[in-house]
Structure formats: C-alpha cells, structure tokens
Image: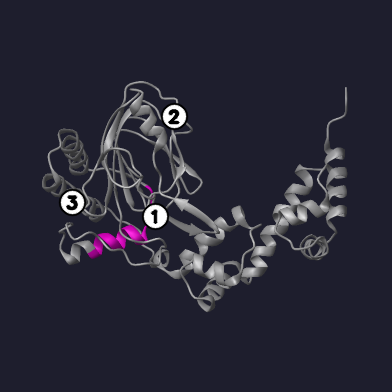
Amino acid sequence: MAKKPIPSYKESDKTYHADACEPLAAAAASGKVAFHALARSSYPGRPLRNSELTGLQSAGYWDAKREQDWGLPLHRNEGIELTFLETGAMSFSTGGKTWRLTPGSLAITRPWQPHQVGRPNVGIGRLHWIILDVGVRQPHQQWKWPDWLVLSPADLAELTGILRENEQPTWRASEGIAACFRQIGRAVETEAGASRLAVFINELFLDLLDLFRSEPVPRDKALTGAQRSVELFLGSLAESCAEPWTLDEMARNCGLGVTRFVHYCHLVSNLTPMQHLTHLRTAKAADLLLRDPGKSVTDIAFECGFSSSQYFATCFRKHHGQSPAQFRSEQRILGDSSAPPSP
C-alpha cells in the first residue's frame, strides 16, 4: 500500500514536513517503550479512518520504564499539540530555551512551532499527547477547529484567542486535564471508539480553557498579526540566506503581499528585505572567513549567496569597514596576540 504524503509547508525556501516520530516508532517496535496511539498521515499508531475525528492527527502515550537512547529532535507538527507528562521527568525545548517537565507538566506547541523532546534522549516516564490540525501555517491565519469539537462559539473563540495570543510553552496541568489525558490513553489502548474519544477530547479542551481562566494569562494580539509572521520568517532566514531569494518568494513564504511584507520587514529590522538578506549573508561570510582559513574569498562569496566576488567585497566593506581579506588577516592577528604564550 502506498504511503500517504506527509503534510508540509515551505518557509525560508525550506520544505518542512510534519514529524513522523521515527525514533519513537523504532523504540516501540524494539520493545524499549510501551506505545499506544491513534494516528493518521505520517504519525505512528493505529490508523484513524478518514471519516472519523477529522483533524485529529495523533493521540496516545508512551511509557518508558528505563532510560532511553533516543529522543525527538527539533521537529514541527502541523497542528496544536498538547503534551502531558504523567510520571517521570523529561526535557522539552522550544524557542531556544529548555524546560524540565515533571509529573503534571503540560506543554503546548502551536502549529508548525519547532520543538524538541529529550536533550538529546528522553528519560523514564509516561508521556501523553494529542495533535489537532487547525488548518494554519502562519500566526496571522485564522484557526479552523473540527466540527466535532462542540464547545460553544463563545468558549471556542476565547480558547482560540488565548492560544494564539500567548506563547507560554509550559503549564501546570489541573487534575481535570490529567484525568482527561488518562481517559484518552485508556480509550486509545482499549479501542473504545471515536465517539468516546471525541467526548474526552472535548472535555480536555474545556478543562484547558478553565485552566486559563483560573490564572492571569498575559495576551498579546501582536502575536496573531502579520508582523509576527514576518518576525518568525526573518528569524529563520539565516539558515537559508545563501539561497537565491527574490522579494516575491519572501513575501509568499510569509503568506503576504509584497507591499505588506516590505512594510513589516522594515518595521521589524529597520531594513528592506534585500538589505536584511545581505546583512545575513555578510555575517555568514565573516564567520566562514574565520572558521575556514583555507577557503578562498571567492568560494565563500558564492557559498553565502553572492553573485560575484566583486559584489561580495563591496557589500562586505560596507558592513565591516574593510575588505574580506583585510578582515580575515586582522582577526587572525588579534587571535594570535590573545593566545597564551608557549611554555
């Protein structure tokens, strides 16, 4: 049977695929963890029928009784993901920061938000999760919940607003949330059926809303605007700055028209998109000039996305006040002078 295509989207000229959780699947297959899940698309687990619980991409748990030799490296999921650690301890990372999950910790990741579980390996513990696709790729796009989620329109609007306008990744789960995850886990394990699972998932999101209502949750509407989409795009652009970007491609990757994209790029960086791209390329080149002294200036220019060595030299001098060769030579002399004397 042919494999189903893995959900994906493009950003910074890279194609991101929803995580297939291959390390977890391998660990379950080899008996390192107990594993129970319902899944569709690329996720491991018992397949969901196309007609049931549309939008639910994965739900289940793993139970590790000993330290593991695997982890889930930086990855993305196409939906909102709620992760609950019932027992044990585990590292969770996103946005360049790491948190230690302990029993009762709840982690929330937004659609396509990069995150990691384990550092690098996961530990002993029972971890539950649910991933629900809400049909978005960028922060400024409107969420579309599946129709079997039956919270009232007012409750669902409030929940959506909080999830979109607050990026706090970790919380202390209420007993109601913990109970819902345990019920979902048992329903998955015992094949209790879609109707019962839908009831538990609805209750989970209602309990999540109650958690948010029980404590002050700072909200920032700016996190749902086009500016936030541009901020995230520019933050990831350094990884692919050597690609042959055009203004149209940059705007398209943000889901914006060129005029709006240029406006928000200048607002965020005080530069035009192409000026920002050149800044990233010269910074990458400066790093390579020092890290790889055997590589020619011309090779570095092309590697960093410049069309010619002459244009590279002009841009580099504008940003660093000296030619690439002078920069490399001067930094090498400074490095030698700071080295401790030989014994």
Quarter of the figure that contains the N terminus? top left
The magenta stretch spans residue 159: yes
The crowding category of the residue bearing disc 1, from other C-alpha atoms within 10 Å (few below 14, some 14 to 19, many at least 20), is: some
Residue 89: x percent and y percent? 36, 30
Quarter of the figure that contains the C terminus? top right
Residue 92: x percent and y percent? 42, 39
Q: CA distance from mark 2 to mark 1?
A: 27 Å
Earlier-in-chain disc, 1 versus 3: 3
Q: CA distance from mark 3 to mark 2?
A: 32 Å
* Residue holding disc 1: 167
Which range is magenta? 157-169
27 or 98, which lies in front?
27
* Residue holding disc 3: 52
Residue 66: x percent and y percent? 36, 20
Look at label 3 and name its amino acid: Glu
Q: Which mark is residue 70?
A: 2
Residue displayed at 63% across by 59% down: 243
Look at label 2 and name its amino acid: Trp
Earlier-in-chain disc, 2 versus 1: 2
Look at label 1 and name its amino acid: Glu
Q: Do tag 1 and tag 3 residues touch (Cβ < 8 Å)? A: no
